[in-house]
Image (cartoon, rainbow, N blue to C red):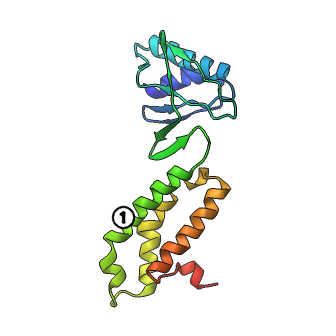
Amino acid sequence: MAELLMRMALDGYEGGCRYADDIVLIASSEEELRDMVNCLHEAATELGMKTNGKKTDVMKVSDDPSPITITVAGITLTETKSFKYLGAQFNSEASCDEELKARLAIARHRMSELIPIWKSRTVTNKLKARLIQALVWPIVTYGSEAWTLKAVRIHRSLRDAMLSKIDVHLVHRARK
């Protein structure tokens, strides 16, 4: 049903991300977003569905500080400065600092859970490096495709700092 709704509502629009019933609409202007939201609401109404204005937020990524005003079914949508979508944090400054900090905190926690392995003399450094690549690195890099270049540089330096603490180097680094 959600797929039919999206096809009906957003035919002809380029911007949007969908996963099950979680939808992010991406527009280049407030007017385009207003049109998309109205089309989505009208299509939902045709299918006997409702748009929950209380659970729907808008976010503006722009240097222009003026607020954005979008209404659906007579309810003005709340403007938010950040939101979480599929486990990744997005904010109105288009910066990924908070997302990066959260990813690193989760990865540090995972590393601490594996301390017995890191301290073990029976586990080779090569295996430890492979365990980091399999168990920790995916946590750190989740969503990294959308990170800014500055964050990627920070990410690399933090990775190096994290790895130096346990005296294990990534396998691909050891080959250089």
User: What percent of the width, then of the height, locates residue 9?
Assistant: 56, 20
Q: Residue furthest top?
A: 74
Foreground residue among 38 and 79: 79
Q: Secondary structure at mark 1?
A: helix
Which kind of residue does numbered mark 1 sit on? His
Q: Nearer the viewer, residue 163 or 86?
A: 163
- Establish if 123 lies above or below 20: below
Q: Is residue 46 above or below residue 159?
A: above
How far across and how far down the image is residue 81, in percent? 53, 35
Which residue is identified by label 1? 109
Residue lying furthest bottom: 121
- Residue 1 in the image: state x and y as whole percent: 42, 25
In the picture provided, is 119 more to the left or to the right than 41? left
147 to the left or right of 125: right
Say which residue appears at 67% left-offset and 57% top-offset. Answer: 149
Residue at x 57%, y 16% (from the top left corner)? 39
Quadrant containing the C terminus in the rendered view: bottom right
Vertical comparison of 13 with 45: above or below: below
Residue 174: percent from left, percent from top: 57, 84
- Front residue of 133/6: it is 133
